[in-house]
């Protein structure tokens, strides 16, 4: 069952704007993430919309949710690695 009482704890968007990761803090104190892809429809009226790619299990910390996200989302892993190379 979905926990609707949650707030965004962290949000990351891919450099090209096509993907988004949202980490939520639930009302019970646990964290979960949702990954989405921006779809740009080819048909009029050309309204882009977000489609959920995947969702996580429950985590005790933001870092735990982010670690799982990095393990399953190739775009986030590549972006994180590229940022570490630049440092």
Image: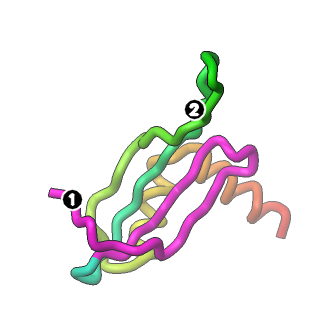
Residue 39, disc = 2
On screen, residue 87 versus residue 56, left or right, reads: right
Name above or below for residue 32 compared with residue 26: above
Which sits in the foreground, 56 or 28?
28
Q: Residue furthest right?
A: 86
Residue 10 place in picture, x, y as percent: 53, 72
Q: Residue furthest front?
A: 45
Residue 58 place in picture, x, y as percent: 27, 66
Which sits in the foreground, 82 or 58?
58
Q: Main secondary structure of the magenta part?
A: strand
The residue pinned by badge 1 equals 2
Report the span colored magenta: 1-26
Secondary element at image label 2: strand
Q: Residue at x 76, y 62 (%)?
A: 83
On screen, residue 74 versus residue 79, left or right, reads: left
Q: Are marks 1 and 2 in contact (CB under 8 Å)?
A: no
Q: Quadrant of residue 52?
A: top left
Q: Residue at x 33, y 72 (%)?
A: 6
Q: Residue furthest bottom?
A: 29
Which sits in the foreground, 45 or 20?
45
């Amino acid at each position: 069952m979905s926990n609707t009482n949650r707030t965004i704890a962290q949000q990351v968007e891919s450099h090209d704007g096509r993907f988004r990761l949202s980490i939520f803090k639930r009302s019970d104190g646990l964290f979960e993430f949702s990954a989405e892809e921006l779809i740009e429809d080819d048909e009029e009226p050309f309204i882009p919309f977000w489609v959920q790619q995947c969702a996580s299990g429950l985590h005790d910390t933001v870092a735990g949710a982010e670690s799982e996200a990095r393990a399953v989302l190739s775009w986030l892993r590549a972006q994180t690695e590229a940022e570490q190379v630049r440092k």
